[in-house]
Each structure stands twice: as C-alpha cells, then as structure tokens.
Amino acid sequence: MKELKIKAYAKINLTLDVLGKRADGYHELQTIMQTIDLADIITLRELNQGIKIVSSSLQIPTDEKNLAYQAAQLIKSRAGIEKGIEIRIEKNIPVMAGLAGGSTDAAATLVGLNNLWELDFSEAELWEMAARLGSDVAFCLNGGTCLAEGRGEILKPLNPPPPLWLVLVKPQIGVSTAQVYRSLSLDRIGRRPSQSAMIKALEDGDPRKIAENLVNVLETVTLEMHPSLAVIKEEMMSLGALGALMSGSGPSIFALTSAAEAAQAIAEKMEKSLKEVFVTTTLGRLEKRFLR
Ligand code: C5P
C-alpha cells in the first residue's frame, strides 16, 4: 500500500487587523502570516476504503470534525477516488492555540494526497479546496510569509525575512476563535498595525523594526478575557524580548529575540511556570516538506 510522510507547519501572525464585519458573518482581515519551524508529522497510508484518523493526542477529534478528515473527504470526492486513507497525526503543535494547528494538518493532507495519488490538482484548485475548509488552510498550503486578506484566504506572498529567533508559549487556557471575534468591538480598536511598515521591516530583515510593528487587534479582546496573558507578555519583555505578541485569536504568545541564545535564555525562565514553551525560528516558503 502507498504511504507518504509530510510535515505540517504552524504559523504565527506578525500583524492582524480586522477591517469590518462581512455579510457572511466572517470578518474582513488584513494579516501578515508567517510559517514557523514547529510541525506536526502527518503519515498518509492508503486503505481499501474509508477515512481513518489516528493520533497520539487526545485533544483532537478523530472523526469528521477533524479538518484533515474533511480535507481527505473533499479531495477524494473531487478526484473520484474510491480508495481509503489512514491519516496518522503526530501532534507537536499546541491545540486551539492560534497557531493554525488544525488548518495546517488539513493543508498537508491536501498536498500529501495530491502527491500520493498523483492527482495533478493545480495550485489554484488546491487553493479553492483549502479556502472552502477554513480561513487559514490556504496559507498553510505553501506557507512562508504572506499578507492575507478577505477571511484570510486571499494571499499575497512577501519576501521572507532572514530566520528570526522566537520563543513561543502556549498557556493552559482555552480560547474560542468565534467568541473572540464576537467580543471584538470594531469602534473600540486601539492601535492598528501598519502593514506597509511591517513589510518594509521584513524586507530590511531588521528584528528591532519588526518587533516595533507587531500589532494584533484581537489581542486586547483575549487579554481582557484572560489577564494572565498580559503578565506573560510583560515577563517576556522584561527578560529581554524585542517584542511580544499574541498569535491569531490566542492564547499563544510569541516573543521575538535577536539571537538563539537570547531565545533560549527566555525560554528557560518561562519553563518554570509554563508547560508548553518552544524555541523556534521563522521559515520561508515550504518546499522540502516530504519526509519520504
Ligand atoms: O474559518 P475558521 O473555521 O478558522 O474560523 C473560525 C471562526 O472564527 C469562524 O467561525 C468565525 O466566527 C471566526 N472568524 C471570523 N472572521 C475570519 C476568520 C474567522 O469571524 N476572517
């Protein structure tokens, strides 16, 4: 039976602005998304029939609620494939964290099955399927650095910065993305990001300027719900981070640092009070993601 292994990378949002509410209930976004070197490992193995999700993580659904299941179902029906598939998910990305963990598993399933079954779906066809599955899935197909608009599915690739060293923490708090968007008052948004200033800072590869432009308008909402997140941000700043920001709707917070050693030192301190702490870097567009 055919088998393939593919890495499914997490993302962070370097900026996130909400421009308004749309007729379809979603919000109109402008966000700079960035792939980071933290990935789930997805193993796809052909079965005679059906879709089966297997995972060591007890935190993710193994039925059709899992986006990877929906991705397999969609691409199978588009291609008219009768064969089944086992999707094994080695979960390294924190769950419900604002890191697109579910979306990236779905994107990797689309890319992986396109390859495993030699389906020859074009980039545009994969994009259309991805956008249907969720707001962040399209970005996760190719990753890198992108300005995303619409619901987050309209992507403009940007030149990736040189690898930036990050500390990422996932506090043990559950955040519902839908609830965060519901609680956002558009007329109460304070500082908005300058996308052009961030794009310039990324082009210059200047970590200090990138840090100055880290702004996420959802942060105030989630930090009001969970004041402990503000304490974490302050702690990372006092430990020497250049900047710190919540990713997506939270609750993950990342700190930008100037070098690996600085990131390691901050992580060691944060590990005293938090279980999920990662030192990682930003990545360019995903090319070598198949493991065998
Ligand atoms: O598309 P996805 O399932 O990731 O979105 C989760 C929820 O976040 C949506 O149901 C919606 O409530 C909210 N959302 C939004 N505007 C967006 C993206 C997400 O309101 N652009």
Image: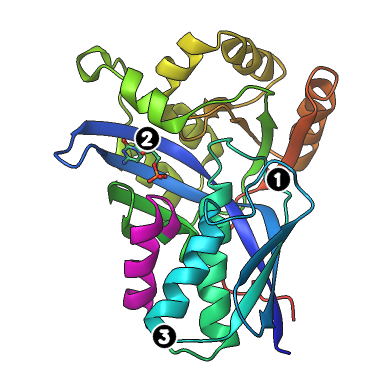
User: Majority secondary structure of the magenta segment?
Assistant: helix
Give the x, y percent position of residue 178: 39, 31
Image mark count = 3
Q: Is residue 195 above or below residue 249?
A: below
**Segment tinted magenta in the rendering:** 122-137
> Residue at coordinates 55% horizontally, 50% vertically from top-left?
102
Badge 3: how crowded within 10 Å, few (<14), some, or many (20+)? few
Q: Nearer the viewer, mark 3 or mark 2?
A: 3
Q: Residues within 10 Å of mark 1 (few under 14, many from 20)?
A: some
What amino acid does circle 2 point to? Leu
Q: Which amino acid is tagged 1?
A: Thr
In the rendered image, residue 167 lying in the magenta stretch gets the answer no
Answer with mark 2 or mark 1, whichever residue precedes in sequence: 2
The answer to which image quadrant residue 196 occupies is: top left
Q: Which mark is residue 16?
A: 2
Coordinates of residue 156 in the picture (x, y in percent): 31, 59
Badge number at residue 79: 3
64 shown above or below 18:
below
Q: Residue at x 61, y 81 (%)?
A: 49
The residue most toward the left is: 23
* Helix, strand or loop at mark 1: strand
x, y percent for residue 174: 59, 25
